[in-house]
Amino acid sequence: MGLADMRRPWEVWIAANTTWFVVNFRSRLIEALLREGHRVTVLSPVDAYVDRIHGLGAGHHPLVMDNAGTNPLADGALVLRLIGIFRRERPDVLLTFTPKVNIYCSMAGRLAGIPVLATISGLGSGFIQGGWLTWVVRQLYRAALRHPYRVFFQNEDDRRLFERNRLVRPARSESLPGSGVDLARFDPSQRAATNGPFVFLLAARLLWDKGLAEFVEAARILRAANSQIEFRVVGFLDVKNPSAVPRQEVASWQAAGLIRYLGATDDVVPVFAQADCVVLPSYREGTPRCLLEASAMGIPVIATDVAGCRHVVEDGVTGLLCAPRDARDLSEKMQRMLALAPEARRRMGDAGRRKMEREFDESVVIGRYLSTIEQVLQQPAVSG
């Protein structure tokens, strides 16, 4: 029995910590569900992207939450609110994304009798920083991830880490190739010929965890020896995250001539089209969308040799890998990229495009979600 032949319409809910996240990373999934004739509601905080959700044809239910908060009373109140929402609205299945939403929606979904599909798209600052907060986050994951019907991971490193620490049961976990990439939208034909300086681009939320400090220090090292390089940064400032880079810090980097901050954009294709190399010196990732998109456009990349990046970048083939938290090594890899002949960089970009076609097509990811939703609604969720 196919997806469209089952009881319709289903009430499929998608939950995340920002509406922006859903619009930018899950719009195609929403469109696929709507094409099947089902109803989709996004559960997320109200922001400037709610109208975009309605424009897709989906509904929106506001979620009041503090993304960066660690107050247990506030988080307990959040779980109670979620239980009330789920019992009142009775969605057929709930897809959750982003760390805090994964944890508390999984708990509330269990108590309200709603099957949950959780996606671990990144471990978050609390998991990366270490100390007491990491211990607390792990205990929360251990309690919450007993309940979802399926827990998707965006790379095998994260999946093995959770299984090794008994945070998730192997029978419930699967790996996905990230959120995939739209191969038609991110195409090498979009790239523009440039005669200006060589452009290194970092495209990410402006968080220390994304390696902003290392990128800027590498820029400082390389600019001292070669003025014909430009270091561009695009992404959101002022995000509510413990790892957020202060606006004044970015302003000081610009004033010193180290970077050119382009602001935030919902359409990175024109920005990528002007880049010679995309750089992500992140400390850890799920599967970084910027590397998928850059590679799909045939742009060589440089990333850290960490979980989430190393399975996207084939070192020396589609890009280069550098040591994490090491600005000197990053600068050396950037210098190596600069030293390559244009034809060698083109071959590297072409290899990246082929890898995206083989392994990271967005339609494959959407198909996995749709087939798993079908499984959920054909049988009861696994008991906790």
Image: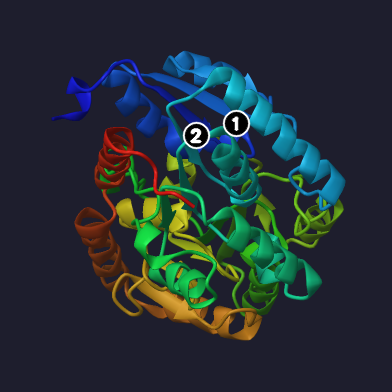
Residue bearing mark 1: 19
**Count of marks, rendered view:** 2
Relative image position of residue 70 (x, y in whole percent): 82, 53
Residue 194 shows in this picture: no
Q: Residue 114's mark? A: 2
Q: Nearer the viewer, residue 377 or 366?
A: 377
Relative image position of residue 337 (x, y in whole percent): 43, 75
Relative image position of residue 368 (x, y in whole percent): 28, 45
Q: Distance of mark 1 from mark 2, alpha carbons?
A: 21 Å
Q: How was this image coloured?
A: rainbow
Q: In this view, does 126 lie above or below 5?
A: below
**Callout 1 secondary element:** helix
Amino acid type of the residue that numbered disc 2 sits on in the rendered structure: Ile
Amino acid type of the residue that numbered disc 1 sits on in the rendered structure: Thr
Categorize mark 2 by other alpha carbons within 10 Å: few (<14), some (14-19), many (20+): many
The residue mark sitting in front, 1 or 2, is 2
Q: In this view, does 337 lie above or below 185?
A: below
Q: In which quarter of the image is the N terminus?
A: top left
Residue 374 shows in this picture: yes
Q: Give yes or no for contact between labels 1 and 2 (Cβ–Cβ under 8 Å).
A: no
